[in-house]
Protein backbone atom coordinates (compact mmCIF):
# COMPACT_ATOMS: atom_id res chain seq x y z
CA UNK A 1 0.00 0.00 0.00
CA UNK A 2 1.08 3.58 -0.61
CA UNK A 3 -0.20 7.15 -0.35
CA UNK A 4 0.14 9.74 -3.08
CA UNK A 5 0.07 13.21 -1.51
CA UNK A 6 0.26 16.75 -2.82
CA UNK A 7 0.32 20.14 -1.15
CA UNK A 8 -2.90 20.64 0.78
CA UNK A 9 -5.12 23.08 2.61
CA UNK A 10 -7.18 21.79 5.52
CA UNK A 11 -10.52 22.80 7.01
CA UNK A 12 -13.10 21.18 9.27
CA UNK A 13 -13.21 19.07 12.41
CA UNK A 14 -12.54 15.53 13.54
CA UNK A 15 -12.46 13.46 16.71
CA UNK A 16 -9.03 12.13 17.54
CA UNK A 17 -8.72 8.37 18.09
CA UNK A 18 -8.67 6.84 21.57
CA UNK A 19 -5.39 6.44 23.44
CA UNK A 20 -3.39 3.34 22.59
CA UNK A 21 -1.55 3.43 25.94
CA UNK A 22 -4.71 3.67 28.01
CA UNK A 23 -6.45 1.00 25.91
CA UNK A 24 -3.60 -1.44 26.57
CA UNK A 25 -3.65 -0.84 30.31
CA UNK A 26 -7.43 -1.06 30.48
CA UNK A 27 -7.28 -4.45 28.75
CA UNK A 28 -4.52 -5.71 31.03
CA UNK A 29 -6.33 -4.71 34.21
CA UNK A 30 -9.61 -6.14 32.90
CA UNK A 31 -7.87 -9.54 32.69
CA UNK A 32 -6.71 -9.24 36.30
CA UNK A 33 -10.10 -8.12 37.61
CA UNK A 34 -12.75 -10.37 39.12
CA UNK A 35 -16.05 -9.84 37.35
CA UNK A 36 -17.05 -7.84 34.31
CA UNK A 37 -15.28 -4.77 32.93
CA UNK A 38 -16.76 -2.39 30.34
CA UNK A 39 -14.32 -0.35 28.26
CA UNK A 40 -15.90 2.43 26.22
CA UNK A 41 -14.34 4.25 23.23
CA UNK A 42 -11.41 1.82 23.00
CA UNK A 43 -8.81 1.99 20.25
CA UNK A 44 -9.74 -0.66 17.68
CA UNK A 45 -6.34 -1.20 16.07
CA UNK A 46 -3.84 -3.95 15.27
CA UNK A 47 -1.98 -3.32 18.54
CA UNK A 48 -5.20 -3.59 20.53
CA UNK A 49 -6.05 -6.82 18.71
CA UNK A 50 -2.71 -8.28 19.81
CA UNK A 51 -3.40 -7.39 23.44
CA UNK A 52 -6.97 -8.73 23.23
CA UNK A 53 -5.65 -12.01 21.89
CA UNK A 54 -3.11 -12.18 24.71
CA UNK A 55 -5.62 -11.67 27.51
CA UNK A 56 -7.95 -14.21 25.92
CA UNK A 57 -5.07 -16.70 25.93
CA UNK A 58 -4.94 -16.22 29.72
CA UNK A 59 -8.67 -16.86 30.10
CA UNK A 60 -10.42 -13.51 29.70
CA UNK A 61 -13.80 -13.70 27.96
CA UNK A 62 -14.27 -10.83 25.51
CA UNK A 63 -17.40 -9.48 23.85
CA UNK A 64 -16.84 -6.76 21.27
CA UNK A 65 -19.26 -4.16 19.95
CA UNK A 66 -18.77 -1.05 17.83
CA UNK A 67 -17.63 1.20 20.67
CA UNK A 68 -17.40 -1.00 23.78
CA UNK A 69 -15.59 -4.06 25.03
CA UNK A 70 -17.17 -6.23 27.72
CA UNK A 71 -14.54 -8.40 29.38
CA UNK A 72 -14.91 -11.03 32.08
CA UNK A 73 -11.59 -11.21 33.89
CA UNK A 74 -9.92 -14.08 35.73
CA UNK A 75 -9.02 -12.31 38.98
CA UNK A 76 -7.07 -14.56 41.32
CA UNK A 77 -7.69 -17.55 39.02
CA UNK A 78 -4.77 -16.59 36.80
CA UNK A 79 -3.95 -19.57 34.62
CA UNK A 80 -1.39 -20.51 31.96
CA UNK A 81 -1.75 -19.21 28.44
CA UNK A 82 -3.52 -21.66 26.12
CA UNK A 83 -0.91 -21.25 23.39
CA UNK A 84 2.10 -19.14 22.53
CA UNK A 85 1.36 -15.40 22.43
CA UNK A 86 2.09 -13.29 19.34
CA UNK A 87 2.78 -9.65 20.18
CA UNK A 88 2.62 -8.73 16.47
CA UNK A 89 4.36 -5.30 16.33
CA UNK A 90 3.55 -4.24 19.90
CA UNK A 91 6.36 -3.58 22.36
CA UNK A 92 3.77 -3.06 25.09
CA UNK A 93 2.30 -6.52 24.55
CA UNK A 94 5.79 -8.05 24.57
CA UNK A 95 6.89 -6.35 27.80
CA UNK A 96 3.61 -6.13 29.74
CA UNK A 97 2.46 -9.67 28.95
CA UNK A 98 6.03 -10.90 29.48
CA UNK A 99 5.97 -9.60 33.06
CA UNK A 100 2.41 -10.75 33.67
CA UNK A 101 3.26 -14.27 32.51
CA UNK A 102 5.63 -14.48 35.48
CA UNK A 103 2.56 -14.80 37.73
CA UNK A 104 2.00 -18.27 36.29
CA UNK A 105 3.94 -21.38 37.27
CA UNK A 106 3.59 -22.72 33.71
CA UNK A 107 5.70 -21.77 30.71
CA UNK A 108 4.57 -18.91 28.47
CA UNK A 109 6.17 -18.27 25.08
CA UNK A 110 5.86 -14.82 23.52
CA UNK A 111 7.02 -13.90 20.04
CA UNK A 112 6.32 -11.10 17.55
CA UNK A 113 7.04 -9.75 14.11
CA UNK A 114 10.49 -9.05 12.68
CA UNK A 115 10.79 -5.71 14.50
CA UNK A 116 9.87 -7.27 17.85
CA UNK A 117 12.35 -10.11 17.32
CA UNK A 118 15.27 -7.97 16.16
CA UNK A 119 14.80 -4.36 17.35
CA UNK A 120 12.84 -4.23 20.61
CA UNK A 121 15.17 -5.00 23.56
CA UNK A 122 13.79 -7.34 26.21
CA UNK A 123 16.96 -7.97 28.26
CA UNK A 124 16.20 -5.40 31.03
CA UNK A 125 12.88 -7.11 31.75
CA UNK A 126 14.28 -10.65 31.55
CA UNK A 127 17.16 -9.79 33.90
CA UNK A 128 14.80 -8.19 36.41
CA UNK A 129 12.44 -11.17 36.36
CA UNK A 130 15.36 -13.53 36.94
CA UNK A 131 16.32 -11.50 40.01
CA UNK A 132 12.78 -12.08 41.24
CA UNK A 133 13.15 -15.86 40.93
CA UNK A 134 11.46 -16.25 37.56
CA UNK A 135 12.78 -18.36 34.70
CA UNK A 136 12.99 -15.76 31.91
CA UNK A 137 14.91 -16.55 28.75
CA UNK A 138 15.44 -15.28 25.24
CA UNK A 139 14.89 -18.53 23.35
CA UNK A 140 17.50 -17.74 20.70
CA UNK A 141 19.93 -16.38 23.30
CA UNK A 142 20.15 -12.96 21.59
CA UNK A 143 18.21 -10.88 24.16
CA UNK A 144 15.22 -10.49 21.84
CA UNK A 145 11.94 -12.33 21.40
CA UNK A 146 10.84 -15.05 21.24
CA UNK A 147 11.00 -15.34 25.01
CA UNK A 148 9.99 -18.02 27.50
CA UNK A 149 8.69 -17.03 30.96
CA UNK A 150 7.96 -19.41 33.84
CA UNK A 151 7.06 -18.21 37.32
CA UNK A 152 5.69 -17.89 39.81
CA UNK A 153 6.76 -14.40 40.77
CA UNK A 154 6.30 -14.03 44.51
CA UNK A 155 8.54 -11.40 46.07
CA UNK A 156 12.05 -10.03 46.04
CA UNK A 157 14.31 -7.23 44.87
CA UNK A 158 15.47 -6.36 41.37
CA UNK A 159 17.43 -3.68 39.53
CA UNK A 160 16.97 -2.70 35.88
CA UNK A 161 17.85 -0.01 33.39
CA UNK A 162 14.95 2.40 32.94
CA UNK A 163 15.78 4.29 29.75
CA UNK A 164 12.81 2.49 28.18
CA UNK A 165 9.80 2.90 30.47
CA UNK A 166 7.90 -0.20 29.33
CA UNK A 167 9.84 -2.83 31.32
CA UNK A 168 9.48 -0.68 34.45
CA UNK A 169 5.74 -0.23 33.91
CA UNK A 170 5.38 -3.95 33.24
CA UNK A 171 7.05 -4.82 36.55
CA UNK A 172 5.00 -2.27 38.49
CA UNK A 173 1.81 -3.98 37.34
CA UNK A 174 2.98 -7.58 37.67
CA UNK A 175 4.52 -7.16 41.14
CA UNK A 176 1.32 -5.51 42.36
CA UNK A 177 -0.44 -8.84 41.78
CA UNK A 178 2.39 -11.06 43.07
CA UNK A 179 1.91 -12.85 46.38
CA UNK A 180 4.65 -11.01 48.27
CA UNK A 181 6.27 -7.58 48.46
CA UNK A 182 8.81 -6.45 45.87
CA UNK A 183 11.40 -3.68 45.60
CA UNK A 184 12.36 -2.30 42.20
CA UNK A 185 15.52 -0.24 41.73
CA UNK A 186 15.78 1.67 38.44
CA UNK A 187 18.97 3.10 36.96
CA UNK A 188 18.80 5.94 34.42
CA UNK A 189 15.02 6.35 34.54
CA UNK A 190 13.51 7.83 31.38
CA UNK A 191 10.14 8.46 29.74
CA UNK A 192 8.81 9.39 33.19
CA UNK A 193 5.38 10.58 32.04
CA UNK A 194 4.65 7.03 30.85
CA UNK A 195 5.57 5.70 34.28
CA UNK A 196 3.15 8.26 35.71
CA UNK A 197 0.49 6.93 33.37
CA UNK A 198 1.00 3.39 34.70
CA UNK A 199 0.98 4.63 38.30
CA UNK A 200 -2.27 6.46 37.55
CA UNK A 201 -3.80 3.05 36.79
CA UNK A 202 -2.59 1.74 40.16
CA UNK A 203 -4.20 4.83 41.71
CA UNK A 204 -7.41 4.19 39.73
CA UNK A 205 -7.63 0.74 41.34
CA UNK A 206 -6.47 2.03 44.76
CA UNK A 207 -3.39 -0.21 44.69
CA UNK A 208 -0.61 0.94 47.06
CA UNK A 209 2.98 1.63 46.06
CA UNK A 210 5.94 3.81 46.98
CA UNK A 211 7.73 5.82 44.29
CA UNK A 212 10.99 7.49 45.27
CA UNK A 213 12.04 9.77 42.40
CA UNK A 214 11.49 7.00 39.80
CA UNK A 215 14.63 5.21 41.01
CA UNK A 216 13.08 3.03 43.72
CA UNK A 217 9.63 1.49 44.07
CA UNK A 218 8.20 -0.60 46.86
CA UNK A 219 5.21 -2.72 45.90
CA UNK A 220 3.38 -4.62 48.66
CA UNK A 221 1.81 -7.15 46.25
CA UNK A 222 -1.27 -9.23 46.92
CA UNK A 223 -3.54 -6.97 44.89
CA UNK A 224 -7.09 -7.91 43.96
CA UNK A 225 -9.44 -5.75 41.91
CA UNK A 226 -13.03 -5.93 40.71
CA UNK A 227 -14.43 -5.35 37.27
CA UNK A 228 -14.68 -1.67 36.37
CA UNK A 229 -16.05 0.76 33.81
CA UNK A 230 -13.73 3.04 31.87
CA UNK A 231 -13.90 5.43 28.93
CA UNK A 232 -10.64 5.75 27.00
CA UNK A 233 -9.57 9.38 26.42
CA UNK A 234 -8.23 10.72 23.13
CA UNK A 235 -4.66 9.95 22.13
CA UNK A 236 -2.25 12.89 22.29
CA UNK A 237 0.32 10.98 20.23
CA UNK A 238 -2.19 10.76 17.36
CA UNK A 239 -3.39 14.33 17.95
CA UNK A 240 0.06 15.60 16.95
CA UNK A 241 -0.38 14.72 13.28
CA UNK A 242 -3.50 16.75 12.39
CA UNK A 243 -2.21 19.62 14.55
CA UNK A 244 1.11 19.65 12.69
CA UNK A 245 -0.64 19.31 9.34
CA UNK A 246 -2.78 22.38 10.08
CA UNK A 247 0.24 24.41 11.22
CA UNK A 248 2.44 23.71 8.20
CA UNK A 249 -0.40 24.30 5.71
CA UNK A 250 -1.55 27.51 7.42
CA UNK A 251 -4.97 25.97 8.03
CA UNK A 252 -7.58 26.14 10.79
CA UNK A 253 -9.14 22.93 12.12
CA UNK A 254 -11.10 21.76 15.17
CA UNK A 255 -10.24 18.61 17.12
CA UNK A 256 -12.57 16.87 19.57
CA UNK A 257 -11.95 14.44 22.47
CA UNK A 258 -8.90 16.37 23.72
CA UNK A 259 -8.72 15.98 27.52
CA UNK A 260 -5.95 18.28 28.69
CA UNK A 261 -6.26 16.87 32.22
CA UNK A 262 -5.25 13.39 31.11
CA UNK A 263 -1.78 12.26 32.15
CA UNK A 264 -0.39 11.16 28.75
CA UNK A 265 3.17 12.32 28.23
CA UNK A 266 2.74 13.30 24.61
CA UNK A 267 0.37 16.13 25.50
CA UNK A 268 3.66 18.00 25.96
CA UNK A 269 3.61 18.29 22.16
CA UNK A 270 1.02 21.05 22.48
CA UNK A 271 3.35 22.97 24.82
CA UNK A 272 6.18 22.55 22.32
CA UNK A 273 4.24 23.94 19.37
CA UNK A 274 2.89 26.84 21.43
CA UNK A 275 6.46 27.73 22.37
CA UNK A 276 7.20 27.71 18.64
CA UNK A 277 4.40 30.22 18.09
CA UNK A 278 1.35 28.07 17.30
CA UNK A 279 -2.00 29.62 18.21
CA UNK A 280 -4.20 27.07 19.97
CA UNK A 281 -7.50 27.64 21.74
CA UNK A 282 -9.19 25.24 24.12
CA UNK A 283 -12.83 24.94 25.12
CA UNK A 284 -13.59 21.92 27.30
CA UNK A 285 -12.43 18.91 25.29
CA UNK A 286 -12.31 20.84 22.02
CA UNK A 287 -9.06 22.16 20.55
CA UNK A 288 -9.06 24.88 17.90
CA UNK A 289 -5.89 25.09 15.81
CA UNK A 290 -5.74 28.66 14.50
CA UNK A 291 -3.82 30.09 11.57
CA UNK A 292 -0.47 31.12 13.05
CA UNK A 293 2.45 33.27 12.00
CA UNK A 294 5.76 31.62 11.11
CA UNK A 295 6.81 29.05 13.70
CA UNK A 296 10.13 29.68 15.44
CA UNK A 297 12.78 27.04 16.01
CA UNK A 298 13.46 26.09 19.64
CA UNK A 299 15.44 23.58 21.70
CA UNK A 300 13.39 20.82 23.37
CA UNK A 301 14.22 17.92 25.67
CA UNK A 302 11.71 15.42 24.31
CA UNK A 303 12.41 12.36 26.48
CA UNK A 304 9.02 12.70 28.14
CA UNK A 305 7.26 12.87 24.76
CA UNK A 306 9.56 10.62 22.78
CA UNK A 307 6.97 9.48 20.24
CA UNK A 308 6.69 13.03 18.90
CA UNK A 309 10.25 13.13 17.55
CA UNK A 310 9.38 12.39 13.93
CA UNK A 311 6.51 14.86 13.67
CA UNK A 312 8.50 17.55 15.49
CA UNK A 313 11.28 17.07 12.94
CA UNK A 314 8.74 17.71 10.18
CA UNK A 315 7.41 20.84 11.90
CA UNK A 316 10.94 22.10 12.45
CA UNK A 317 11.57 22.00 8.69
CA UNK A 318 8.89 24.69 8.35
CA UNK A 319 10.01 26.77 11.36
CA UNK A 320 12.29 29.81 11.20
CA UNK A 321 15.83 29.29 12.41
CA UNK A 322 17.09 26.15 14.11
CA UNK A 323 15.29 23.49 16.16
CA UNK A 324 17.22 21.10 18.41
CA UNK A 325 15.63 17.92 19.76
CA UNK A 326 17.61 16.34 22.61
CA UNK A 327 17.58 13.43 25.08
CA UNK A 328 15.97 11.18 22.49
CA UNK A 329 18.41 8.25 22.18
CA UNK A 330 15.67 5.76 23.12
CA UNK A 331 13.92 6.71 19.85
CA UNK A 332 16.49 4.51 18.12
CA UNK A 333 14.92 1.45 19.82
CA UNK A 334 11.34 1.89 18.67
CA UNK A 335 9.65 0.27 15.65
CA UNK A 336 12.63 1.57 13.69
CA UNK A 337 15.60 3.80 14.45
CA UNK A 338 13.45 6.91 14.27
CA UNK A 339 16.36 9.34 14.50
CA UNK A 340 18.09 7.84 11.49
CA UNK A 341 14.90 7.09 9.56
CA UNK A 342 13.38 10.58 9.73
CA UNK A 343 16.76 12.12 8.88
CA UNK A 344 17.14 9.91 5.82
CA UNK A 345 13.64 10.51 4.47
CA UNK A 346 13.40 14.26 5.13
CA UNK A 347 16.76 14.73 3.39
CA UNK A 348 15.16 13.20 0.29
CA UNK A 349 12.67 16.09 0.47
CA UNK A 350 15.43 18.66 0.78
CA UNK A 351 15.42 19.14 4.54
CA UNK A 352 18.42 20.63 6.34
CA UNK A 353 18.50 18.02 9.10
CA UNK A 354 21.42 16.65 11.08
CA UNK A 355 21.43 13.39 12.99
CA UNK A 356 22.95 13.38 16.48
CA UNK A 357 23.54 10.43 18.79
CA UNK A 358 20.64 11.44 21.01
CA UNK A 359 18.57 13.71 18.82
CA UNK A 360 18.28 15.98 15.80
CA UNK A 361 19.16 19.46 14.60
CA UNK A 362 16.78 20.86 11.95
CA UNK A 363 16.89 24.17 10.11
CA UNK A 364 14.18 25.74 8.02
CA UNK A 365 14.25 24.40 4.49
CA UNK A 366 11.69 24.23 1.68
CA UNK A 367 10.53 20.65 1.17
CA UNK A 368 9.76 19.08 -2.18
CA UNK A 369 7.93 15.91 -3.10
CA UNK A 370 9.83 12.62 -3.08
CA UNK A 371 9.40 8.86 -2.95
CA UNK A 372 9.62 7.98 0.73
CA UNK A 373 10.07 4.85 2.86
CA UNK A 374 8.34 4.30 6.20
CA UNK A 375 10.40 1.44 7.74
CA UNK A 376 7.19 -0.36 8.82
CA UNK A 377 6.73 2.37 11.46
CA UNK A 378 3.29 3.93 11.95
CA UNK A 379 4.70 7.26 13.15
CA UNK A 380 6.96 7.49 10.12
CA UNK A 381 3.92 6.93 7.87
CA UNK A 382 1.98 9.77 9.45
CA UNK A 383 4.90 12.16 9.88
CA UNK A 384 6.00 11.84 6.26
CA UNK A 385 2.39 12.21 5.11
CA UNK A 386 2.16 15.51 6.99
CA UNK A 387 5.48 16.65 5.49
CA UNK A 388 4.10 15.89 2.03
CA UNK A 389 1.03 18.04 2.70
CA UNK A 390 3.28 21.07 3.07
CA UNK A 391 5.80 20.22 0.34
CA UNK A 392 5.88 21.39 -3.25
CA UNK A 393 5.10 18.70 -5.79
CA UNK A 394 3.98 15.11 -5.35
CA UNK A 395 5.16 12.66 -2.71
CA UNK A 396 4.65 8.92 -2.69
CA UNK A 397 4.69 7.32 0.77
CA UNK A 398 5.40 3.60 0.48
CA UNK A 399 4.42 0.96 3.03
CA UNK A 400 1.61 2.78 4.82
CA UNK A 401 -0.33 -0.16 6.28
CA UNK A 402 1.43 0.16 9.65
CA UNK A 403 -0.64 3.28 10.39
CA UNK A 404 -3.32 0.81 11.55
CA UNK A 405 -1.24 0.30 14.69
CA UNK A 406 -2.47 3.50 16.35
CA UNK A 407 -4.52 5.51 13.86
CA UNK A 408 -6.52 3.12 11.65
CA UNK A 409 -8.49 5.93 9.97
CA UNK A 410 -5.61 8.38 9.47
CA UNK A 411 -5.96 8.63 5.68
CA UNK A 412 -9.75 9.01 5.83
CA UNK A 413 -9.55 11.61 8.59
CA UNK A 414 -6.99 13.69 6.74
CA UNK A 415 -8.93 13.43 3.49
CA UNK A 416 -12.06 14.56 5.32
CA UNK A 417 -10.15 17.68 6.38
CA UNK A 418 -9.30 18.35 2.74
CA UNK A 419 -5.84 16.80 2.46
CA UNK A 420 -4.84 15.88 -1.08
CA UNK A 421 -4.14 12.26 -0.19
CA UNK A 422 -5.09 9.15 -2.09
Image (cartoon, grey):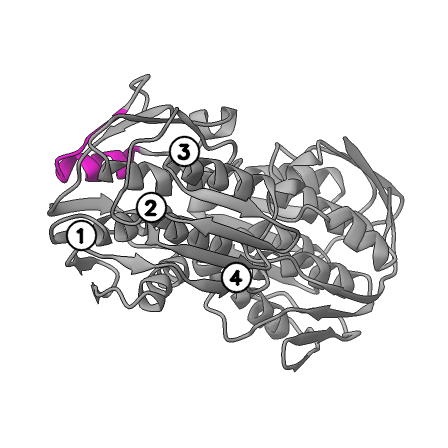
Q: Can residue 327 be seen in this view?
A: no
Q: Mark 4 points at which residue?
A: 266
Q: Quadrant of residue 349?
A: top right
Badge 1 marks a residue whose secondary structure is strand
Q: Which of pointers 2 and 3 lies earlier in the amino acid sequence? A: 3
Q: Which residue corresponds to the image point at 18% horizontal and 52% vertical from the top-left?
A: 184
Q: Residue at x 79, y 47 (%)?
A: 388
**Structural crowding at the residue carrying mark 3, measured as other residues with C-alpha within 10 Å and reported as few (<14), some (14–19) or many (≥20):** some
Q: Which of 386 and 218 is in front in this view?
A: 218
Q: Quadrant of residue 78?
A: top left
Q: Return the residue at label 1.
A: 185
Q: Dot 2: what SS?
A: loop
Contact check, label 2 and label 3, Cβ < 8 Å: no
**What is the C-alpha distance between the residues marked 1 and 3?**
31 Å
Above-or-below relation of 307 to 16: above
Q: Distance between the residues labelled 2 and 3?
A: 11 Å
Tell us which disc is closer to us: 2 or 4. Answer: 2
In front: mark 4 or mark 3? Answer: 3
Looking at marks 1 and 2 on the same chain, the residue that comes earlier in the sequence is marked by: 2
Instruction: Say few, some or many: other residues with alpha carbon within 10 Å of mark 1 (under 14 / 14 to 19 / 20 or more).
Output: some
The residue to which callout 2 is attached is 74
Looking at this view, is 331 or 43 the one in front? 43
- Residue position for label 3: 57
Closer to the chain start, of discs 4 and 3, is 3
Residue at (85%, 56%) from the top-left corner? 416
Magenta span of residues: 123-137
Q: In this view, does 377 lie above or below 83?
A: below
Amino acid sequence: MKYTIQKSKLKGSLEIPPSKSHTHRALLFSLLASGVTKIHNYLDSSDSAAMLNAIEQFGAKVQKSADMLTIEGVGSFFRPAKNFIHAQNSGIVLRFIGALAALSSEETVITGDLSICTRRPIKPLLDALKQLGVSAESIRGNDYAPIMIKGPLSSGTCTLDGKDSQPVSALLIATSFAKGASEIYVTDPGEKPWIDLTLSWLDFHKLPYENHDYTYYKIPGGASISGFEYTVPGDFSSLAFPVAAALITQSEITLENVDRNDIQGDKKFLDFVQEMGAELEFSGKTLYVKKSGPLQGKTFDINGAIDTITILAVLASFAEGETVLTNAAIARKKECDRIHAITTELKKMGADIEEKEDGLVIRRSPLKGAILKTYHDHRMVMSLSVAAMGAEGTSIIEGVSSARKTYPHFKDHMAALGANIR
